[in-house]
Amino acid sequence: MNGGWLGLSARTWWLVVVAGVAAGVVYVLSPLSVWFVFAAVAIVSWAERGIEGEERRWLRLVLVTAIVLRVAAVLVLFTITNHSTTPFATFFGDEEFFIKRSISLRNLALGVPIHSADFTYAFDEVGATSYLYLLAAIQALVGPAPYGVHLVGVAFYLSAVVLLFRLVRRTMGSVPAFVGLVLLLFLPTLFAWSVSALKESAYLLLTASTVALAEALVRGRTWTRRAAAAVAILVLIAAVESLRRAGAALTAAGLVGGLATTWFVTRPRVLLATAVIVPIAIGIVLSRPIVQVRAFQNIRQAAQQHAGHINTPGVVYKTLDDRFYISWYDLGEMRFFELARFIIRSAVDYIVVPLPWQARSNAIVAYLPEQAVWLLMVALVPIGLVPALRRDPLVTSLLLAMAVTAAAVVALVSGNVGTLVRHRGLVIPYIVWLAAVGASELYITYARRRAEARLD
């Protein structure tokens, strides 16, 4: 008979058997790799849902390429490492902290003896985060996976990007959504953080989920759905706080700011009145001595954190007056205009650093092309903001507020170029869509004028 069982040919059955054996071998060597394949298929299917034709084919090509490149990066890391001398390799130094501590926590949970030093290190308050316990729980199920945990971060990052992509596509259009998707998947620094074992990908997924839930809270068709969205937001905010200190405050501030902005921009008369009243109200509030003292204390605390970054390894930049770097004790005597200069310089440097003449390392030189893309995005945001608000004021306001909140905090406390670039990764996933709207509006205007010129 030419056909085998269930009508399949013998050759087909051999292929099925070989594939099954290969999958079994891979699962024994790296269980997370197999689970990642299922997750990747699910993510791509989710991204394609409701999208047809040429757009669907391009979307699949972009996502599959992004996935393959990330898996290849992890494979290269594994291949080039001499495991006879090194237990495992990492892309960034901080990853070793997450991997070692999570494995120690996993071993403790399973009753595997560990060294007393590892026990102390596992529960060290410095860098404590719930992400350690998440990685430990995963490895308790599949075994120690110093390379597999990179794929966990990839899955989280891809899920967050697809979530935002689908939200923006539904509210602002397919072109801005596709442009933003490509940038988030292939910008070098974001690519690097997405394949790491760090908590950035999980943080992005949680905060992006709160944005989607905030939209559901406002636009839910039933009170049951709105209540469920509200409860889910509270749970996720608590999870964000467990992941990163002050994460709950930043996320909540972004959501409240976005919802408040939506309320104002959809009521032009109220917005106009607010534009007049708010500066007056701020002046009245700041005229109170107790408020002035509290505001000065907060800004000085941020200045102290910034000054601390000046002594960290790598390339640093300064936003305080020179005298404060000579004696930190003078920070307690900062005057009003010194505080004002610090705030203005911090805001400007957050955008423009690193400047070309600050490229004192190969890493910064390599980053300069992406810095040009970053500056272009920042320039396009104001252009795309009004059109985006017209298309969907709620989603636009949420994205903008989340970005501004994260940027404001990082701008004041940062002082290390590498740390600044890393923390921009918390902002780019939200402003990239507004920049994409700006780019599409410019292209439409250009195409219209060119068509009019031809008619003339």
Image (cartoon, rainbow, N blue to C red):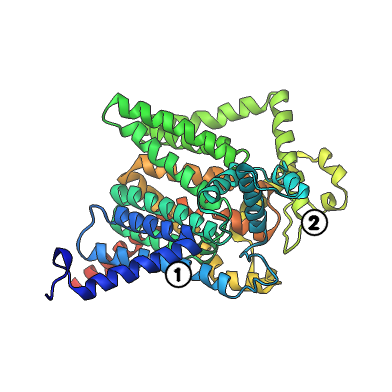
Q: Is residue 313 above or below residue 291?
A: below
Q: CA distance from mark 2 to mark 1?
A: 36 Å
The type of residue carrying mark 1 is Leu
**Residue 327 horizontal/vertical position (percent):** 88, 48
Is label 2 in contact with label 1 (beta carbons under 8 Å)? no
* Image quarter of residue 365: bottom right
Count residues near mark 1 (Cα–Cα under 10 Å), then give few for <14, some for 14-19, many for 20+.
some
Q: Position of residue 236 (x, y in %)?
A: 48, 36
- Secondary structure under the numbered disc 1 in the rendered image: helix
Which residue is depicted at the point 49% across and 65% down?
A: 187
Please tell me which residue is depicted at 51% across the width and 70% down the height of the picture: 75
- Residue position marked by numbered label 2 in the rendering: 311
Q: Position of residue 180 (x, y in %)?
A: 40, 58
In the foreground, 186 or 17: 17
Vertical comparison of 172 with 444: above or below:
above
Furthest residue toward left: 1
Q: Amino acid at mark 2?
A: Asn
- Asked if residue 112 lies left or right of residue 169, the reply is right
- Can residue 122 be seen? yes
* Residue on which disc 1 sits: 69
